[in-house]
Image: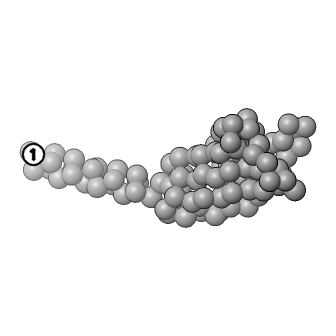
Amino acid sequence: MKRRFWTGLLLCCFVSAAAIAEASDLFGTVRLKGQPLPNTVVTLKDGREDLQTKTNLRGYYSLRDIEPGKYTLVIQLRDRSTRQVPVYVFPQSTEKNIDLK
């Protein structure tokens, strides 16, 4: 009985570690005509669950614990218009800088 418990516990630890290892981060800077866009809403869409954040005063954004794959970043500008940018999140941290025209 004890052996099964410890084997199950060890298996759960390995599965949890593997799931954590696959999560990635996405970060970058949003600019408009070369100028940073502060306090801009950035949404990562994948068709299931959206992740959202805001840029800081320098236009920097960061999203954590993302599964690698294809996504769309939606940038909401102050005039409420949006820009969509395709992005591929790699298993390592992924930097995606966006310069809107």
Q: Residue at x 27, y 50 (%)?
A: 13
Could you say where residue 62 lies in the image, as x and y percent from the top left?
A: 59, 46
Q: Residue furthest left?
A: 2
Horizontal side of 68 relative to 28 (left or right) equals left
Name which quarter of the figure residue 14 lies in: bottom left
Q: Residue at x 57, y 60 (%)?
A: 94
What amino acid is labelled 1 in the image?
Met
Q: Tell me where residue 63 appears, x and y as whole percent.
A: 58, 46
* Residue 68 drawn above or below residue 8: below
Residue in front for this viewpoint, 86 or 9: 86
Quadrant (top left/top right/bottom left/bottom right) for the C terminus: bottom right
For disc 1, the neighbor class at 10 Å (few under 14, some 14 to 19, many from 20) is few
Looking at the picture, tell me which residue is in the foreground, 27 or 47.
27
Q: Position of residue 30 (x, y in %)?
A: 73, 49
Q: In the rendered view of the protein, which quadrant contains the N terminus?
A: top left
In the figure, 81 relative to 19: above or below?
above
- Residue 18 quadrant: bottom left
Tag 1 residue = 1
Q: How is the image coloured?
A: one colour
Image position of 36 (left or right of 3): right
Query: Regarding mark 1 in the picture, which secondary structure is present there?
Result: loop
Residue 86 in sight from this viewpoint: yes
Q: Residue at x 68, y 42 (%)?
A: 58
Residue at image location 9% in from the left, 45% down from the top: 2
